[in-house]
Amino acid sequence: MEQLAEQLLDDANKRFIQKDDLLIACLETMTEDQLYEMAIKHGYIKTEVEPDDYITPDPDMSTPEKIIDAVLARYGE
């Protein structure tokens, strides 16, 4: 981690600055590429589909029900 990043994180941990404020500032100033790389590095998004990611939706379910079912399958109930 870069020296400035370490200092900001340390300041946030010591509550000299609010973590939410730091997060918002980072998200507002980071480029899309930086956000994408960070999200992949920390596992916030996947770049590959894993076999467990596939679900077979019930054909009798409405579209909103299918969406809810898919979200619950990914993130849990």
Image: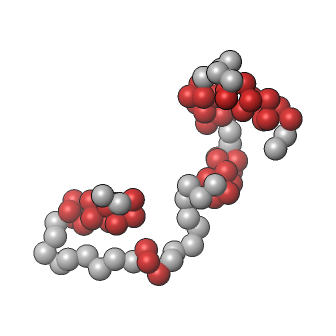
Residue name at image x 68 percent, y 18 percent: 16
> Which percent across, then down, holds residue 18?
60, 23
Residue 41's quadrant in the figure? bottom right
In the picture as drawn, the residue positioned furthest to the right comes out as: 3
| Colouring of the image | secondary structure
Q: Is residue 6 visible?
A: yes
Residue 43 occupies which quadrant of the picture? bottom right
Instruction: Left or right? Give the position of 60 relative to 57.
Output: left
Percent x, y of residue 33? 68, 50
Q: In which quarter of the image is the C terminus?
A: bottom left
Measuring 39% from the left and 77% from the top, which residue is drawn there? 54
- Residue 67 visible in image: no
Residue at 67% x, 51% y is 38
Q: Position of residue 34 (x, y in %)?
A: 70, 47
Quadrant location of residue 27? Answer: top right
Q: Which residue is drawn at 68% across and 42% down?
A: 31
What is the tally of numbered marks visible in this picture?
0
- 10 and 8: which one is in front? 10
Task: Point out the residue furthest to the left here.
Answer: 60
Is residue 21 placed above or below 67 in the rendered structure? Answer: above
Q: Is 33 situated left or right of 56 in this image? A: right
Foreground pick, 3 / 33? 3
In what quadrant of the picture does the N terminus appear?
top right
Against 6, is 12 above or below? above
Q: Give left or right: position of 41 versus 7.
A: left
> Can you name the residue that lies furthest to the front here?
14
Task: Give the answer, above or below, for where 1 lies relative to 59.
Answer: above
